[in-house]
Each structure stands twice: as C-alpha cells, then as structure tokens.
Image (cartoon, grey):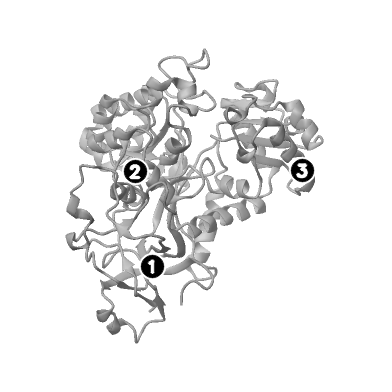
Amino acid sequence: MTRILFRGGRVHTSSDPHATALCIEDGVVVWVGDDGASAQFADNAERIVELDGRLVTPAFVDAHVHLAQTGLAHRSLDLSVAPTRQAALDALADYARATALPVVLGYGWDETQWPEQRAFTRDEVDRAVDGRPAYLARIEQHSAIVSSAFLDRCPDVAGAQGYDATGRVARDAHHAARSGLFRLLPRSLREDAILEALTLAARQGIGMVHELGAPHISPPEDFDIIGSLSQAAASGERPGLPDVEWYWGSLQVDDARRLGCAGAAGDLCADGAIGSRTAAMRAPYADDAGSGHLYLEAEQVAAHVVQCTRHQLQAGFHCIGDRAVGEVVAGFRQAAEAVGAPAIRRARHRLEHVEMASAEDLHVLGDLGVIASVQPRFDALWGGPDSLYARRLGADRATPMNAYASMSRAGVALAFGSDTPVTTFGPWAAVRAAAWHRTESERITVRAAFDAHTRGGWRASRRDEGGVIAVGAPASLAVWDVAGELEVQTPDTRSVAGSSDPRAGVPQLPDLQPDEDLPRCAMTVVHGQVAFEEEGALT
C-alpha cells in the first residue's frame, strides 16, 4: 500500500468545496475533507505533504501533442524570438557551429513577425549552416525551409508536390522532408526527445497527453518508445510520467488497431494550416490568390468514420479552413446515415482544431457527439484585428474563428491542448486564452475552460473516470503556488454575482485576468506516483 496525505491547502473538488486535505492510496483518491479529519490517515501514510496553503487540482490533460518533435524543438534553435530575418540567420549560423546533432534543427520562425515580411531562402540557409543538412520548421509545423545538403540526403523531397526551389517545402514535400528527417536522426535521439517532452509536460502540471502520430508526422516506432517509458514508470524503474493516449492519423484502420491506438484519428489531415496558406478555404486568401488545399473528400471521411465506428475505434481529422471543416462535417452526416446517429455518438469521435466551423456545422457535430480538440492559444497568438489570421483571411473571416462559446452552446464538448511544439505546454495560459478570447462573444468562463483542459481530455479519450478529485477517481493531480486569491473567476457578466462568495459552495480557481501571474506548479502526481516536484518546495 502506498498512501500519501496532503493537508493544509485548498483542494479543488466538487464533493467538498471547502476541502483542505486529501488522501491518495495505490493510485486512487480515497478521501477528501478538512485538516481536522485528516488525522485518521496520518499514521499509515508513507508521506505527508504539507501544502502551506497551496492549491490542489486535477492534473491537466493536453489533448494534442507531438512528443518527439517537442523534445527535439526544446533542444534545437528557437527561431520564434528572432526579431528580423537577418537575426534569425545570424542565430542559425551560431547554432550550426555549436550543435552536434546530425541535422541542424530550428523551429518556430514566422516571417509575418519580421519587418521584411519574407522567409529566408535555401541559399541563405546554406551559407548560415556552412553546407550542413538543415530542417527549419515554420511555427505552425505545416511547412519548412530545408538546406541543399538536406535535399542531397533526401532527394525525393524536391520531386514532391509543394516543393519550391527556394527551399520551402509544404504539403507532400513537407511530408517527405519529415520522413527524411526521421531517417537522419538516430532512435536514441528520439527516445531522449520523447522523455524530455513528457518531463516538460509534468513540470506544467500535466498528467496525461494525447500523442497524435501519423505517417507524415512520426514513425510508428515512437509508440514503442512511449510504451517502454510508460511501462518503466508504472513498474517503479524510473520516476512517474504523464499518461499517454496515442492515435494514428491514417485511413488504414488496421494500422491503428495493430499499433494499439485509441483511434485512427488525430492528424489525419483534411487540410493544412492558415500560416502556410494550406488550410482549405471556400474563398481565396486575403493576401494570396490561392484557396489552400483539401486533402480529403466527404466520401473518404464517411467511409473512415463508418469503419472506425464498426471497429469501436475513434475516428478523427485535422480540419482548420471553412471548406475542410464543411467537408468533414458532410462526411459525418453520410456516416450517420449509414450506421445511425446513436452509433456515431457512442463512438465519441473527435476533430482537431475546428477553427472555422459554421453554426450549421456545429449543430451537426453537437448532435453526433463529436468532440472538438482545440488549442486556445492559437487565438491568443494569431487572433485579433492586427494578427496573422486577419492578414491571411481578412477581419470578417478571422473574427469568428475558434468559436468556443458557440461550440458549447451547440453541445460540442471541448478538450484543450497545445499542439506542441506549435505552442508550448502551458495549460493555465490556455485556460486564460479561452476565457479572454479576442472575440468577446466567443469567451467561455474560466471554470468551463478549466474543465475542458482537465476532465475534457479524459472524455476525449473515452475515459470518464478522471479529471476530477473525488473518492475513487485516479490520483492524478497537481499542486500549485497561486499568487493571488482564489475565486470563481470569469469575465462572463451573466454569472451569478454570489457565486464568487466561498459560501456559495462552488469550487474556486485562481484569478487568471491577463495582468495576473499564472500559477506555478510545485508537484505533479500521476496515478499516485510523483512525476514532478519542485526541489525544496514541499515537505
């Protein structure tokens, strides 16, 4: 028996909104209450954690991650901070001289943030890296610049659709470039990267992640690495790690079943991304004559959903542009006609991003029980009248994007994630971004956003037992240092005024207004095992 008693804090639980203590045993919450009653659990406790007023919440779930890419990005060159194109090239030259990696890796560049408003070219990169293989991913991870030496090692890239002589790769060429990158990086490096990503997640109070693999994103061997790491953590051979639910984005359902995936879902792409102008639009981009690229038709979507439903697997698709979302929704309609709406609802399928959904689309998704796995920090980064979305699409199309309030009203369940390394792990920042959406009418309450980033992630993986602190629930929780007071924090003026009073009996959350410091994680526990603990913070 492994028992840990937490006392002297504030516990976020609907079972007792005034709770100050809890006890976990053998990976499960066995008691929640006040400090006075906690004495009955102290004698046999392996450890007593004195919270000193800290907040305990369910651990967060990040419902959309790419672990190996995240770990690689963390040890690679961060180009997102470069203020100009030349500054990016200078940083690249310095990094190329210092790194021992077989490929010079950089992530996060965004030419729209540079005064020049243009990306660097292959020739410029060749000079900066002194002729070495280099792969430099744009911030949204749907395009990149590769060097001449990289093309020499991966000659199939230049012949694929989406290749440009400037070294820019998108669509099939980007898929080929990523496949080439897999070959050039040793397995040991991917192992280290995946472990590093899981460790980073735990440091942010994240107790579960959904790994969204696909043939164009990661090799299936990554699942073997994840499984080995998870097994070692479960057996006590190494410290605890976040849970991992994995998905394989392929129309080949048997591949997902063979790999032991929760679904043939995730980054099964119906289109690309707005930043690279590959998201499929009904009308051309405001800053380009093209309308993006549609990768799947409604009939393909329907056939896949039907097959997954019959195999009791989750289906799911990456869809961003209004044309792509509409095509996917049309496919779900056809699937419901084939197998019946109740069967679709029971399967609890999911969509990733869903950034440009019409009211009619949302009504269909709500009726069919499709979960929206969304990334609120996309709006924080690229929403608003002067940001990327408005430049690419115009304000009329950009303003209603990422419609979280509309999704909720339509009955579409939300699960929050980061799409790391597109954005970093940062669950409180995501909750804040949803509550202070740049379009005021699409804001949701802090409480609803918090639920989407905790319980919503469990539900998105068809596991309903977690994401809460309650007797019998998994002991996956996080301990937080909170700078300000707790309250029922919401920008929604329709909330009941008395709900912020402790006597109202509503579990309270930190004040997340944009000028407040975000909570800092002091400990993360996953199924009763400590996955992260800030040194010296807790006794």
Dot 1 corresponds to which residue?
A: 54
Residue at 59% across, 26% down:
170
**Looking at this rendering, what residue extends furthest in the top direction?**
289
Q: CA distance from mark 2 to mark 3?
A: 40 Å
Rendered position, 329 above or below 25: above
Left or right for 388, reference 331 = right
Of circles 2 and 3, the one toward us is: 2
Which amino acid lies under the numbered mark 2 shown in the image of this protein? Ala
Q: Is residue 305 above or below residue 314?
A: above
Q: Mark 2 near mark 3, Cβ–Cβ under 8 Å?
A: no
Q: Is residue 91 left or right of residue 20?
A: right
Q: In the rendered image, which residue does mark 2 sit on?
A: 435
Which residue of the protein is positioned furthest toward the front in this rendering?
515
Q: For label 2, count other residues whose C-alpha is less than 10 Å away and answer few (under 14), some (14-19) or many (20+).
A: many
When the figure is inspected, residue 528 is found, relative to residue 94, above or below; the finding is: below
Name the residue at 61% across, 29% down. 111
